[in-house]
Image (cartoon, rainbow, N blue to C red):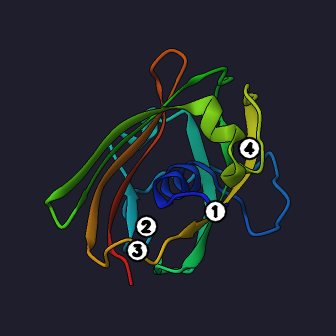
Amino acid sequence: MRTPFVYTLVAGLFYQTAMGVPIKQQQQAFMAPDQHGEIWSLCGDPSSHTLRAYEDGVSISPAIPQTGQDINVKINGNLLSDVTGGKVSIHLKLLSMIKVDKDLDLCQVLQSDVMKGQECPLSKGDVVLDALAYIPREIPKLPLEGDIRISDQNDNTVTCIHLNFALH
């Protein structure tokens, strides 16, 4: 069974990798919210996020998400503190009419098929995570906008991603 699109977005936006390039301790965190392309940006104050993506540490493929296809999101970054629990808060709108407001348990999201069974806790330091999920054909091809905020056990923002794109 394939994983629903919302879980894809959640998992995908939380996890980054450098497309197979090994992580090096001397890499600098990438904080510029306007440099991620057209479909997403960091929200809130990126300097307060406890997950700092490395430069070129985020990849989303395909570049424009499409219904009926898999989406793969990879993140490579540095986690400033251990994450033993938390939540994923999803606030999305399709065409400003259909709203999704949902809180999910972070550890359950990590353990899902999307994340290939990752485990809590996530340890402080270098993090390479990879999410893969299927976008059902039944999802309307409408503009999607909103925020996905991942918080830790103390309600600190691990990362917050603002989405703004139309499915194709």
Across and down, in percent, residue 75 comes to 65, 56
Residue beneath the point at 43% across and 67% down: 35
Q: Is residue 41 left or right of residue 15?
A: left
**Gap in angstroms between the C-alphas marked 2 and 3:** 31 Å
Residue beneath the point at 61% across and 61% down: 55
Of the pair 56 and 106, the residue shown nearer to us: 106
Across and down, in percent, residue 144 comes to 29, 66
Disc 2 versus disc 1: nearer the observer: 1
Disc 4 versus disc 1: nearer the observer: 1
**Circles 3, 1 touching at the beta carbon (< 8 Å):** no
Q: Amino acid at mark 4?
A: Val
Question: Does residue 32 appear anywhere in the picture?
Answer: yes
- The residue at which mark 2 appears reads as 35
**Gap in angstroms between the C-alphas marked 4 and 1:** 25 Å
Q: Amino acid at mark 2?
A: Gln
- The residue at which mark 4 appears reads as 127
Q: Amino acid at mark 1?
A: Arg
- The residue at which mark 3 appears reads as 138
Q: Element type at marker 1?
A: loop
